[in-house]
Image (spheres, rainbow, N blue to C red):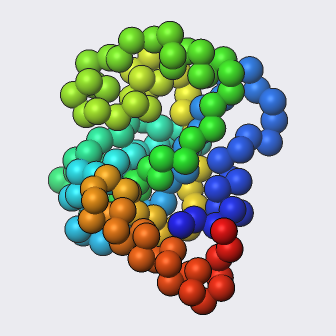
Amino acid sequence: LMEAPILEQVIPESGEDFFASNLMTQIHSPVEAIDETNIKVVTDQEGYALFMSRSPIPHPKASMTFDYYKHLGVLAYSMDALRFFANTKKGVLETIEDINELRFIEHRKQLRMIPVEAHSLSVDTAKDLDYVRGVLQKKLERRELEL
């Protein structure tokens, strides 16, 4: 349900040999922050992923002045990054969290997280799929979308 200009932001501007990126967006709802289907991400100051979790991270022990971000699952990999991913076994953290992108983090490969303003839905259940179908049906009826 995301617009093309948002999706295009994951595409790198340069032709780096190894490139892996993913879109992320700020979480605005406490329900989204605790929903395990929303994968939360923290980045370094340059926007590279430090960790991803199905749990709310960072944990607000000493400060409440931060924002939660979730990854959107819109990824771009160079061929080198894709080969690395395909030829590298899952690490312990990836196995525990069931988050593919942890394979890069666990092996110290940079994963660029690109912040975008997007409202997304993780389509993981039949209920989610029914919702998306309803949204698309309404767009078709209003002629906002063509097949």
Q: Is residue 79 placed above or below 29 in the rendered structure?
A: above
Q: Is residue 3 placed above or below 139 in the rendered structure?
A: above
User: Percent position (x, y) of residue 47?
Assistant: 56, 44
- Single out the residue that lies furthest toward the left: 61
Query: Image quadrant of residue 13?
Result: top right
User: Percent position (x, y) of residue 139?
Assistant: 56, 81
Kindly tell me whether residue 58 is visible in this rendering: no
Residue lying at 65% horizontally and 76% vertically, measured from the top left = 145
Residue lying at 27% horizontally and 65% vertically, measured from the top left = 127
- Single out the residue that lies furthest toward the bottom: 142
Residue lying at 63% horizontally and 31% vertically, measured from the top left = 77
Q: Is residue 66 placed above or below 20 in the rendered structure?
A: below
Q: Quick one: 140 or 28, which is closer to the camera?
A: 140
- Single out the residue that lies furthest toward the right: 14
User: Percent position (x, y) of residue 88?
Assistant: 45, 11
Q: Quick one: 43 or 12, which is closer to the camera?
A: 12
Instruction: Name the image quarter holding the C terminus.
Output: bottom right
Residue lying at 27% horizontally and 56% vertically, measured from the top left = 125
User: Percent position (x, y) of residue 95?
Assistant: 26, 24
Horizontal side of 46 relative to 42 (left or right) equals: right
Q: Is residue 64 placed above or below 7 in the rendered structure?
A: below
